[in-house]
Amino acid sequence: MKRILIIDDNQMVVNLYRSAFASAGFGVEFANDGESGVAAARRTPPDVVLLDLMMPKMNGVDVLTALRQDPALSAIPVIVISNAYTPERTEQLWKAGATQILTKASTRPSVLVDAVRTALAPK
Amino acid sequence: MHPAIDLERLREFSDGTEDGLRTLIRIFLEDIAQMIGELRAAVTGGDAAEIRLLAHRSAGSSSACGAPGLSALLGDLEEAALSGRMDGRAGQMAAIDTELDRVTLFLTDYLASLGETE
């Protein structure tokens, strides 16, 4: 079973995603802020990370940078999902190594699950 | 005008059963009412950082649960708090309350149509 780590400070959103991914056959873990998200990834590296942008302690860009700088975690696909994009922030995320960037408001659960499957597919 | 709720989106997030959808709707209604209550208090108090945080969080829940109009209004308030444009916040909060009423009415009517009795 593939494991997904959801890093998002919104418990309602986490519960929705957890339900969608559990139904799709993924093992799901979550962290409610950036700092604990990085710690959780270091403790047990997931197969894929779903990452919010605006969070307490460490924002999504900092989390992504920390993951990419850690040799044990640098190859893990990271899908960023948020409503808080600006052109500058989007550019920052691509430069920091985002695998995919999605908008929360317009991404249906099935599309999100497909995006994760695509990120996990052998290249 | 946006539809109050994108029911298809909510259905996709549920476990595919009517019970699952009912539970999801109840949780969303409780959660969003509480968050917007906290936001209302922050708007009254004029704390821009708290307004921004709560508006962001509420917008995230609303958009994830398929309430595009509510999410857009909350996003506007978040943006205003971020940029320090707080003079219109009472009017923005009133618009959010009106949209929350619309979302709540839509979902409670929908629950009733499913045979919700609580």
Image (tube, rainbow, N blue to C red):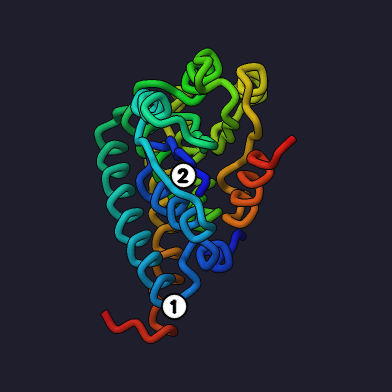
Q: Quadrant of residue B102?
A: bottom left
Q: Mark 2 against mark 1, which lies toward the viewer?
A: 1
| Residue sitting nearer the eye, B102 or A38 | A38
Label 1 resides on the chain identified as: B
The crowding category of the residue bearing disc 2, from other C-alpha atoms within 10 Å (few below 14, some 14 to 19, many at least 20), is many
Indicate the position of residue B24 as horizontal and vertical percent values: 39, 65
Q: Which residue is mark 1?
A: B18
**Count of numbered labels shown in the rendering:** 2
Asked whether, in this view, residue B115 is left or right of residue A114, the answer is left
| Residue sitting nearer the eye, B77 or B53 | B53
Q: Quadrant of residue B56?
A: top left
Residue at 61% across / 60% down in the picture? B1
Residue at 63% across / 21% down in the picture? A97
Indicate the position of residue A80 as horizontal and vertical percent values: 57, 34
Disc 2 residue type (three-letter): Gly
Q: CA distance from mark 2 to mark 1?
A: 24 Å
The C terminus of chain A: image quadrant: top right
Q: Which residue is mark 2?
A: B60
- Let me know if marks 2 and 1 both belong to one chain: yes
Label 1 element class: helix
